[in-house]
Image: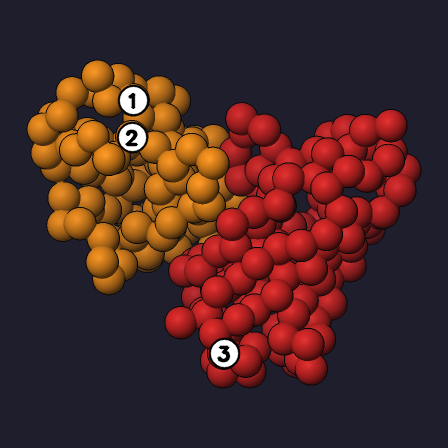
Amino acid sequence: QQQLQESGSGLVRPSQTLSLTCTVSGGPLSSGDYAWSWLRQPPGKALEWIGYIYLSGSYYKNPSLESRVTISIDRSKNEFSLSLTSVTAADTAVYFCARAPSGSVYYDTWGQGALVTVSS
Amino acid sequence: EIVLTQSPDFQSVTPKEKVTITCRASQSIGTHLHWYQQKPNQSPELLIKYASESMSGVPSRFSGSGSGTDFTLTINSLEAEDAAAYYCHQSSSFPFTFGQGTRLEIK
């Protein structure tokens, strides 16, 4: 059974770039057809979908964040990554990586979440 | 963007009570509606997919129903461990969206 684990910077300065990596263990990324996804949850608030990427490299992003978001995937390292540029305090959130069966997009496996605080 | 509105936002309930949480979509989404449970400081857990399909390992007291714009998550005979926030999520169209959440407190 695959497990996901987020890692990256916990504190980011305003206007800088947030970078997170999701490492997949318990099987290769290529073991199934999945949409490897990023979501976030500001403190005390609801979940927000950021986007996802397939092993092929094709991706889909939330239009509200699209100009600032890059999602990439590295099969050799069994990981996928999120980059969010020009961050502000509004980007402070717990960031989750998650897995969704391709064509279905319900999230059946989640990472534990990584708190990222944007502050000077 | 499809807006999902849950009700209630908060409910305080006693064990063994029956709980109903509703999720209304701003436009028809068929049955592309999923329910998650999130306990404090944990990641969400998928309970129900496609409105009514229970996930393996989820207690039978959890059930889902609905289609189109109106959906329901029902918890029969609530247990103390069900204290959590519950979210609905639509995957009918981009961008995927979530409801604002319903927090259940156990008295």
Q: Mark 2 or mark 3, which is nearer to you?
A: 3
| Image quadrant in which you'd find residue A107 | bottom left
Is circle 2 on the same chain as circle 3?
Answer: no
Query: Residue B36, labelled with which disc?
Result: none
Q: Is the residue B14 above or below the residue B34 in the image?
A: above
Mark found first going from the N terminus, 1 or 2: 2
Is circle 1 on the same chain as circle 2?
Answer: yes
Question: What colour is chain B?
Answer: orange
Looking at the picture, the colour scheme in use is by chain
Residue for point 72% across, 42% down: A10
Q: Are marks 1 and 3 in contact (CB under 8 Å)?
A: no
Classify mark 2: helix, strand or loop: loop
Q: Amino acid at mark 3?
A: Gly
Residue for point 41% across, 60% down: A108
Is circle 1 on the same chain as circle 3?
Answer: no
Which chain did the image draw in red?
A
Q: Is residue B37 left or right of residue A9?
A: left
Residue for point 14% across, 50% down: B60
Mark 2 burial class by Cα count in 10 Å: few <14, some 14-19, many 20+ = some
Q: Are marks 2 and 3 in contact (CB under 8 Å)?
A: no
Residue A11's spot in the image, x, y percent? 77, 38
Report the residue marked by disc 1.
Answer: B105
User: Front-most of B48 and A119?
Assistant: A119
Report the residue marked by disc 3.
Answer: A27
Residue for point 87% across, 28% down: A120
Classify mark 3: helix, strand or loop: loop
